[in-house]
Amino acid sequence: MIPARCLALIALLGLSARTVAAPLPELLAALRPGVVGIASYDPLGAPRTVLGGTGFAVGDGRTIVTNAHVVHASAGEAKGRLVVLVGRGEQATIRPARLLREDRFHDLALLAIEGPPVPPLRLAAGSPPEEGEGVAFTGFPIGAVLGL
């Protein structure tokens, strides 16, 4: 039986039955490669990279979904250019990014990145979680403190 806390994440992401059978830690490990950092990058700055938040790859793996406020925190207030950090820890690579679209009312933004695709998360169509149903979120908003 699938734990209730996994159901909303599974519904949102439209995962396969094989992936759905996994416990939450395994499910998150499967999703992690598609989660990226959204940052500003200034090669002459100190620090060079300032993480603003996270996002995730969809579609062709070169389209990133994030929050509009994350884009503005990363690109608006910082002096560097908007980038996406792909990978984990010291092995993260910096990819130039550009804003494709944003919806400030719903706090959503779409970015395009250069380079090889990131493993995309597949979004599912359907109804929102029911009241009382468990929900799990992925991302790492305190990455600047603990590392990507």
Image (tube, rainbow, N blue to C red):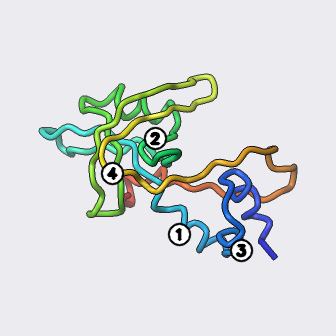
- Disc nearest the viewer among 1 and 3: 3
- Disc nearest the viewer among 3 and 4: 4
Provide the secondary structure element on which disc 3 rests. loop
- State the separation of the CA atoms marked 3 and 4: 29 Å
Viewer-nearest residue: 61 or 136: 61
Tag 1: residue type? Ala
- Disc nearest the viewer among 2 and 1: 2
Provide the secondary structure element on which disc 4 rests. loop
Provide the secondary structure element on which disc 1 rests. helix
- State the separation of the CA atoms marked 4 and 1: 21 Å
Tag 2: residue type? Thr
Give the left or right position of residue 123, taking residue 119 as reference. Answer: right
- State the separation of the CA atoms marked 1 and 3: 13 Å
- Residue plotted at (53% across, 36% down): 67
Q: Which residue is mark 4?
A: 116
- State the separation of the CA atoms marked 4 and 2: 11 Å
Q: Which residue is mark 3?
A: 21
Q: Which residue is mark 1?
A: 29
Q: Which residue is mark 2?
A: 63
Vertical order, 148 against 77 (above or below): below
